[in-house]
Amino acid sequence: MKKEKCVNCGVDTVFDVDTHIDFRTNYIEGVGQFCPRCHNGNKERNMIAIPINFITQTPNDSELGYKIREFYNENY
């Protein structure tokens, strides 16, 4: 069975791709599966989840960057 890869470093995790997320550890909803090292090794993950509509409704890359920075400043 194919293994899920860590969304941060790309290493294979212990979980099969068809394992439901309710039965996984080190999984962040909206982001994906992490290996234990990436999930636990850095308490400040240096990642944020961006609403997908930012990307689908903003065709201009410069404007998208502005929206992401604004989102970051308002929420973090």
Image: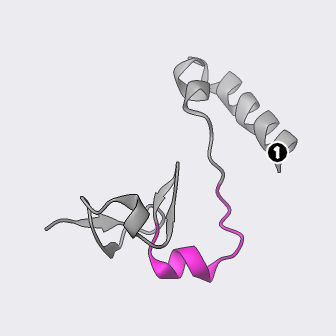
User: Is 64 on the left or on the right of 72, as rendered?
Assistant: left
Residue 39 on the magenta segment: yes
Q: Is residue 38 above or below residue 28?
A: below
Residue at horizontal 49 percent and vertical 71 percent from the top: 26
The answer to which image quadrant residue 64 occupies is: top right
**Could you tell me which secondary element the residue under label 1 belongs to?**
helix
Residue at horizontal 60 percent and vertical 19 percent from the top: 58
Q: Residues within 10 Å of mark 1 (few under 14, many from 20)?
A: few
Q: Position of residue 66 (x, y in %)?
A: 75, 30
- Residue under numbered circle 1: 75
Q: Is residue 16 above or below residue 51?
A: below
Which residue, as the protein is rendered here, is positioned at the far front? 22
Q: Position of residue 38 (x, y in %)?
A: 53, 75
Q: Is residue 52 above or below residue 2?
A: above
Q: Position of residue 68 (x, y in %)?
A: 71, 36
Please state which amino acid type lies under the numbered disc 1.
Asn
Can the viewer see residue 6 in this picture?
A: no
User: Is 50 on the left or on the right of 1, as rendered?
Assistant: right
Can the viewer see residue 15 in this picture?
A: yes
Q: Position of residue 52 (x, y in %)?
A: 55, 32
Residue at horizontal 48 percent and vertical 80 percent from the top: 36
Q: Considering depth in this image, is 75 or 59 the residue closer to the camera?
A: 75
Q: Quadrant of the N terminus?
A: bottom left
Residue 20 on the magenta segment: no
Q: Which residues are magenta?
A: 34-47
The way the protein has been coloured in the rendering is one colour
